[in-house]
Image (tube, grey):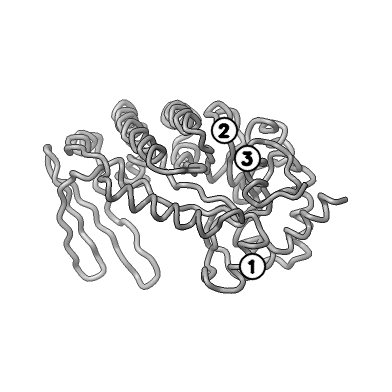
Amino acid sequence: MHMTSRERLLCAFSCGTPDRVPVSPQSLGKLNRESELAKLLIERTDIIIYAGSACNCFIGSAVKFDVETDGALTIITYYTKKGKLRRVIKSTGITRATIEFPCKLPEDVEKLLSIPYEPPTDEELKSALADYNWWKDYIGENGIVLFGLPNAICFPAEWFSPHDFCLLWADAPNAMIELVKVANERLMMFVERVCKAGSIDGFRIVGGEYASVQLGPKAFDILVRQFDKQLVKLIHDYGAIAYYHNHGPIMRYLEAIIDIGVDALDPLEAPPWGDCNMVEAKRILKGKVCIVGNMDDMEVLNKKEPEEVLAIGKELISVAGPDGFVLSGTASGTYGEKAATNFLKLVELAEQMASA
């Protein structure tokens, strides 16, 4: 029985066996949406698109701030009941990044949480849903659109530098836990509003690697597993998919991710970028969590010739498929035309293997 891409992905996400293993670019990468290659990619593959936004639900809509510009620097001053916090963002001709984070010491958690909280406005929510629904209409049955969502640990990770984030957990774990607890409460309220306001197929949850890569298993258990389990239950209560994204070494976290209750996990990176042993990962996750991955977007799909890409793809389908597996990249969003062409060839491979 022939399936549409949407049906194929939903079947795989439920750990079922679709008519063939889905082959899924994650977003359109660097392709122009109106290009013929992008249109062909949408038509022939089983594309996964991320849309919508969390509308700054952690800090909310009531925060007072000023913005100044000094050359390439953007300086944002936040006003709290316990003093000011400052963020400095530097822009170049290519990118922009925070070079000074607002929070630096444990006592800054008190400042951050002293900001009066109001949830995102109805207009902000409406805009996020409009983006999601536009893509859902555009893709149709040719793939699936997931609503992008940070998990609660993203709140401290976005307001402390990576260095100070790690020190906060080492020096003041209770402050970190309190911040993540508050973030999760705000996030759950936001997700419920999204679910009530729109027809959402699924949510793509990001942020686990802030603990798994930077802090270790104990932090992952306390700051990620326990809170994300609540989040995933809420998502499932509304009949939506809980799709989990977690970069970096992953093998020792698979059992915890199963406990969280997610439907699908990406990208399970292979060495040297990660530590995924696909045979072992499939043994652990089979029938519990759909595997999405794990061909590196830039180093494999966008660099290697089709013959080598197809050989890797064949091995992955043989080991991780045909049930509960989506052949995909590593969720970087940076692939180009060569990778897109390789994705198209991988569809042909998946079709051949399904009919063999």
Q: In whole angstroms, how far apart are the C-alphas of marks 2 and 1?
A: 37 Å
- Residue 253, label in figure: 2
**Residue 303: horizontal and vertical position, in percent?**
65, 67
Q: Residue at x 70, y 63 (%)?
A: 344
Q: Are the two marked residues, 3 and 1, in contact with CB atoms closer than 8 angstroms?
A: no
Could you say which quadrant of the image residue 73 lies in?
bottom left
Could you say which quadrant of the image residue 114 lies in?
top left
Three-letter code, disc 1: Leu
**Residue 159: horizontal and vertical position, in percent?**
30, 45
Could you say which quadrant of the image residue 210 lies in?
top left
- Residue 13, label in figure: 3
Three-letter code, disc 2: Tyr
**Residue 82: horizontal and vertical position, in percent?**
12, 37
Q: In whole angstroms, how far apart are the C-alphas of marks 2 and 3?
A: 19 Å
Question: In this orientation, does residue 178 appear?
Answer: yes
For the residue pair 64 and 101, the one nearer the viewer reads as 64
Three-letter code, disc 3: Phe
- Of mark 2 and mark 1, the one earlier in the sequence is 1
